[in-house]
Amino acid sequence: MFFWLKRFGSADSSLSGTTGGQDVSVLILTKIFLIVFGLLNRALLAHMLLPEGWGSYAVCLAFGGLLSLVSSPGAIQGSQYFVLIKKMNVAQGVSCALAICVAGGGLVGALTLPLIYGDAAFFQKAPLQAFQMMLLMVPIVAFSSAIEHQLAALRRFSRIAVFSVLRSFVGVLAIAFFVWYLELGVNGAIFAFAIGHCVMIGLCVGDLRRHFGKIWELPVPSNIKRIFGYGVKFHFARIGIGIGFRAGVLILGFLAVPNEIGIFDAAIMLMLGFMPISDAVGNALLPRIAGRGRPELVALSFRLVCAVTGAFILVFLAFSTPLVRILLSEPFLPAVSFLWIIAPGVLAHAGSGILMTYFKGVDRPGVCSWAVSLGLMVDLSGLLLLYSHFGVVAAAWTMTLGMICRVLLLAIIFKRSTGLSWVKIGLPRFGDAAFLWKSGRSVVGRDPGRSAGG
């Protein structure tokens, strides 16, 4: 592992020294390590918290995640976009993002604190201290994502890869220490979660300081206004994306018992292991299409992401029962049925990520908000209507339906905006496989030529 970290940590060639294929390949190779540590993370939590404890932990994460999204409009995608198109320097991008995260986190914390002392069913699903800790983490979680997006804007993808692996590795150690050794249960799991985000912030800040010098300065009000303005257009989309797979958990927090929530969320967490493929391609794609569009490259990326993600999902589902028994333990076996229901939604979500990258790159983030809002409305309204008849399984079906509605709307608007045919957008080609092979060869140094789409 450390040989890999050294190789790719030193391979980052400033801002533009790598091809698109190499960037994607580096980030996808990271998936191997993230899957390993992610599975260790989930296995430790599953065996020590069991479904009931996992359910409490899931409710807390959904709560904290929602607040971090609501409280930081523009801090992530807005600051990234203006640094990306060179209308803002790195120091302003980072400083404005931090100011928004801290101010927004403090505001939502003050507004939300009285609620956790109330008698709402949602806040009875986990210890009071767990919700209090999540309130303190709101600005930390938001800024962790914002500064990681700054590195992506600067095309430091191999650094992101290395730092993501280190964060996951530290997370596993922290879970083993707080949850297993100290036996702190849900509170220990949240401590471990916090440590992972703090590690990511520290690594990203250190890298930016070494390569770009000064990264802190007094935020310029006009820059905050621009970031906020961009963020408002994308804000609903960002909230929907961020809570997309946890929207059901938020609603179930009021309706279901922790044991049921834990099994449902465990299935989601296993399936989220396939999302780094779409994330990797989207991160490498955005700097290459920002202000230019390049719909043919976007269509290629869409086809590749759907094909590769679908292949991995099919293999996983074929062995899902023994894998769940080994990774999560016997009490989580009911999660297997959820995996099959959720799988099409995960594939749709992966494709949506690429299409939304296009609309962000051409300064039309509002399209993303429309699509995400549609999917979220289908998901939540369907769950509220069907839960009384079908129970927790309704959350899996409605989540998948919402994700499918999202990708369909994005694809329709993408087609109309670019003039590409459905065949060019979604039908796999022989050249796609050739591109994938060439990209893989280029990242290990066997093909020095520039790959397509660079």
Image (spheres, helix red, strand yellow):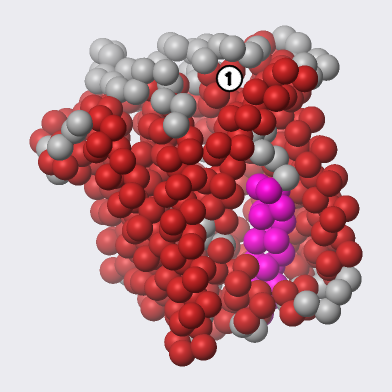
- Secondary structure of the residue carrying numbered label 1: helix
Residue 87, horizontal then vertical, whole percent? 59, 12
Q: Is residue 330 magenta?
A: no
Q: Which residue is mark 1?
A: 82
Q: Amino acid at mark 1?
A: Phe
Residue 95, horizontal then vertical, whole percent? 76, 23
Using a 10 Å C-alpha cutoff, classify the residue at mark 1 as few (fewer than 14 neighbours), some (14 to 19) or many (20 or more): many
Is 66 located above or below residue 79 in the figure?
Answer: below
Name the residue furthest bottom.
389
Residue in the image at 62% along x and 68% along y: 250
420 sits to left or right of 391: left
Is 257 located above or below residue 126 in the figure?
Answer: below
Comparing 125 with 405, the one in front is 405
Q: Is residue 52 magenta?
A: yes
Q: Main secondary structure of the magenta part?
A: helix
Q: Quadrant of the C terminus?
A: top left
- Visible in this render: residue 447? yes
The residue stretch that appears in magenta: 47-70
Residue in the image at 19% along x and 43% along y: 426
**Can you tell which quarter of the image residue 89 is in?**
top right
Is 18 located above or below residue 350 in the figure?
Answer: above
Residue 43, horizontal then vertical, whole percent? 57, 65
Comparing 290 with 228, the one in front is 228
Comparing 371 with 339, the one in front is 371
327 sits to left or right of 104: left
Residue in the image at 83% along x and 79% along y: 119
**Can you tell which quarter of the image residue 225 is in?**
top right
Residue 168, horizontal then vertical, whole percent? 61, 46
Comparing 10 with 276, the one in front is 276
- Visible in this render: residue 23? no
Residue in the image at 16% along x and 42% along y: 422
